[in-house]
Amino acid sequence: MNKTTVKPKYKLFTPGPVQVPAYILRELSAKLVYHREEAFGDIYASVRKGLQKLLMTKNEVYVLTASGTGAMETAVANLVSPQDKVLAVIAGKFGERWRELCIRFGAYVDSLTRPYGESVPPIEIERRLLATDTIKCVFTTLTETSTGALNDVKAFGEICHRLNRILVVDAVAGIGADELRTDAWNVDVVVGGSQKALAVPPGLSFISLSERAWEMVAETKRTRYYFDLRAYRRFAAKGQTPWTPAISLYYGLDAALKQITKTGVVKYWKSHEQMAEFVRSSIRRLGLELFPEKPSNALTVIRMPAGVDGSKLVEACKKEGFLFANGQANLRGKIVRIGHMGPISKALMRRALLCFRKHFLKAAGRAS
């Protein structure tokens, strides 16, 4: 096999996965423990405690060997019975994924949709819930990586709590980069993943539920197996997972969480805010516009001007060792997404931005 086909020669500036720090890579190479021994229980307990601090919740957190979509499916499978009515709050591809999952699991889905690039006004959620008292759950995103938009989850939580609805948040891309105070903001269910701002390789996701949400889990009329949260809860009581976990990734996640705790969660958010502003200052100097009206700290999404093909720009930068992300679906070529999650140095980001600048000016027919 040609090794160059599986070992890319670029650094990741995509919206996940991201560059994995050397200290985490070293942890991944450690010898495996047996997942039914006490040694694994110690690691699992440390990871869950670290996730509680990161999410700012007193609720238990359960780790799944699955991608972020696996955690999303877990939420739906454990909360939604056939014919339940739910609200999918959609401002991009991952809001649409909530809708697709709920439909697959037999729910009647009411969709509240905003054009790509916009965030969902909280008042629209309140109006929809007041108009339809049979909606049990509201599914939404914190950070919409397809557009770079940030939703006002704090306001969503206040509305859902006041109107006695369960709020479920896909925070896979936002956790660690954007502010999220699970308990204080009345978020009932939050799902996350390892490969974004936590800077761990893909393969682990996690989910946390409020007691209100657990009451719904107990009542859900649905067959579940791999993603049955009742099993995760039982096994967690003895320091285990119900199925074989991705043990090496637990090592990496534990190391990442300990570093974030040492830094301080609020400071970690702030570091992402500062990096976002650093990137956007460079983008503004080129006369370019951001695509989202309320951007996340996790990534910068740039609207391509007429005559500039974002797809070609991404490919040109890739050849020089910097991989940005194209737009998805009908946004392909129309936007470029620059991820800045995890502990990226300004020196490395500056090099990536100089590459972007060079190829943008060339594509726009402007002297560099």
Image (cartoon, grey):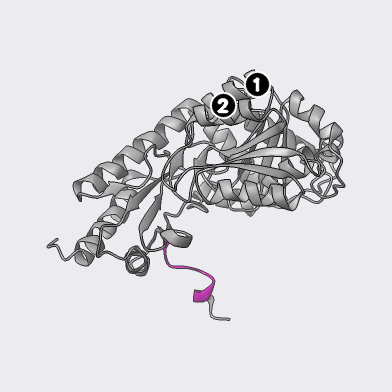
Side (left or right) of 68 relative to 328: right
Picture disc at residue 99 = none
Side (left or right) of 104 relative to 93: right
For the C terminus, give its image quadrant. Answer: bottom left
What's the residue type where badge 1 is placed? Leu
Q: Are marks 1 and 2 in contact (CB under 8 Å)?
A: yes
Task: Examine the rendering and report whether any part of residue 77 can be seen.
Answer: yes
Count every numbered label the image shows and give the total: 2
- Report the magenta stretch's main SS: loop
What's the residue type where badge 2 is placed? Glu
The residue lying at 63 percent from left, 54 percent from top is 29
Picture disc at residue 126 = 2
Task: Examine the rendering and report whether any part of residue 185 can be seen.
Answer: no
Side (left or right) of 335 relative to 43: left
Q: Nearer the N terminus, badge 1 or badge 2?
A: 2
Picture disc at residue 163 = 1
Query: Picture quarter containing residue 310?
Result: bottom left
The magenta stretch spans residue 366: no
Q: Residues within 10 Å of mark 1 (few under 14, many from 20)?
A: few
Is 100 placed above or below 296 here? Answer: below
Is 224 placed above or below 2 here? Answer: above
Residue 246 in the image, given as x and y percentages of width and height: 72, 52
Residue range of the region highlighted in magenta in the rendering:
4-11
Q: Furthest residue to the bottom?
A: 1
